[in-house]
Structures are given as C-alpha cells and as structure tokens.
Amino acid sequence: MKEIDFTDLDKRKKLYDGANGNKISIIYNNEQYMLKFPPTAKINKNMNYSNSCFSEYIGCKIYESLKIPVQKTILGTYKVKGKNKIVVACKDFTKHGVVLQDFASLKNQMIDSERNGYGTELFDILNTIDEQNVVNREELLDRFWDMFVVDAFIGNWDRHNGNWGFLYDSRTDSMEIAPVYDCGSSLFPQADELIMKEILTNDNELMYRVFEIPTSAIMLNGKKIKYFDFIVSIQDENCNRAIRRITPKINMEDIKSIVFSTPYINDLQKKFYYTILSERKSRILDFTLRKLKSI
C-alpha cells in the first residue's frame, strides 16, 4: 500500500468537535476528509500517544467488510514540528445542506423524558428509538443492535449517544441514519508493546480482555454493560437477532487480511489485534450463536 503524506494538502476551515485528539479538515482526491491525530495516552503514560488511529482504521474496515454503512478511513502521515505522525483520514460524509446530528440530539427531542440526551441507560435509548418518528423505527433498532454486536467484537469502549446518529438534509427536512463513525476506542488503543506481549503470553490477561473489558458505554441499571455477560444471557431478542445477522457474516480470513495489510503496524501489533478479534468472536459471538441455535 502506497504511503500517503497529508501534510501539504489543501486545508478547509471546517471545525470538528470531539474529545479524542486534534482534528483538521483536508482535501484529498477532491474529497473532504477529517484528519484525526492520535491523542495523548491518558491511562498508559509510558506511551507517546495512543494507537487510536489504527483502531479507527481497522474498526471501520471491519464494519465495511460486514456491509454496514461506515465512514471511509485512510492511514497516512502528517509532519508536526519536523516529526511525522501517523494519522487517520476519515471521509466527511456531510455536504452542502446535509449535516450530522447525533443520537443525543434525537434523545433531547423527547420532551417528556427526564434524562438528557447523553444519558446512556439502555432503557432510555430503546425508548427513544421506539418513540421517535424521524427515521424508520425497525431500521434504527437494527442499526443500534448491529453496532452493539460489532462493537462487542472489536472491543469498543465508547459508543455513546454522541458518536452515532443521523444525516439531516435541511433542503428537504428529511433524516437518514448516518454511516457508522468513530471507532477509535476499540482494540485497546492504549496497549503498548509490553502490554501486548503480556496479553499474548498470559492466558489470564487475554481472557480478562475478552470477558471483563472493555465494557460498553451503554448502561443497564446504572452500570456499564459487560459485552460477554449481556450478549450470552440472550435476554434481549433484538440483540439475539443481531447476533444471528452479524456473526455468520464475519469471515476471519477477511479480518486477518484487514489486520495484516494495515500499514505502519509491526508483526506484534498484527498478532495482537488478530488474536483479540479471534478470541472475542469465538468466545462471545460464536458461543452465543450456538446457544441460540440450541433452544
């Protein structure tokens, strides 16, 4: 894969919000992209910066392989103070008259709700999906649970109400579900090489990152959901249907190709990402699918 240097490309004045890393707007191949810079690692202070750009790239490529609408991502470099940083370019899917509105904005529209839009209690999210009338209810419900299952697979800590949503067309006053975006908190972005080696050589450490962490940003009765516990409990039929939809589509040879063709990462990182994905698929998704088929 040809390495791309984004440094001298045309810039645009468009601003992007969000807490994880700096962002600028650039033009690449006559299309507008948001260029995301890796944030400083907050938990692991031994890292110069987190691996979130790789997480963003691989996570979105996995969504793409499953035919779920997702932002296009490209890895490249950008020179800052004489040093090249690895960055990820995320295609801007808005356009003139079409803006991105997050799920929290829709949740805020529920004027009789006592909780604000950014509250992530599962009951409130599902209630908003059920009561809203801006997009097809069944399609929105399916997208929510499809994301939940894929995020369980890629280990996404941070699918909150501010990083999924809709495209609003002010010209027609119409709304559609936006492509999936913001997968930078998946695949343990603050794991450095020492942590990766420990996880790959210590089964207890690996299983901890399958069964215990990451948790979802979504809460059940005030506690963040553990993906394994919730999914294998088969307590929600809509989640069960998403397991049946998504799991058979995951081809681990395709996943391996995505990971091993990712530029800028070394063999240890490739082995780490593929191992995490293989174990999470086997022990969460495949296990649950077999359970559903047995009843």
Image (spheres, rainbow, N blue to C red):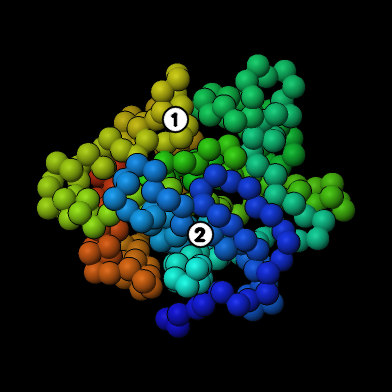
Q: Amino acid at mark 1?
A: Asp
Q: Secondary structure at mark 1?
A: loop
Q: Which residue is more in the foreground, 40 or 73? A: 40
- Looking at the image, residue 218 sits to the left or right of residue 71; the answer is left
The residue depicted at 74 percent of the width and 35 percent of the height is 133
Q: Residue 58: which quarter of the image?
A: bottom left
Give how far across and how far down residue 210 sits, in percent.
Answer: 26, 42
Q: Residue 275: which quarter of the image?
A: bottom left
Q: Would you name the residue on which mark 2 appears?
A: 37
Q: Is residue 157 above or below residue 75?
A: above
- Looking at the image, residue 119 sits to the left or right of residue 168; the answer is left
Q: Which residue is more in the foreground, 131 or 40? A: 40
Q: Amino acid at mark 2?
A: Phe
Give how far across and how far down residue 11 sits, in percent.
Answer: 68, 69
Q: Is residue 178 visible?
A: yes
User: Which circle's residue, 2 or 1, is located before the other in the chain?
Assistant: 2
Q: Secondary structure at mark 2?
A: loop
The residue depicted at 54 percent of the width and 44 percent of the height is 19
Q: Residue 229: which quarter of the image?
A: top left
Q: Would you name the residue on which mark 1 appears?
A: 236
The residue depicted at 47 percent of the width and 41 percent of the height is 158
The residue depicted at 54 percent of the width and 59 percent of the height is 36
> Is the C terminus in the top left, top right, bottom left or bottom right quadrant?
top left
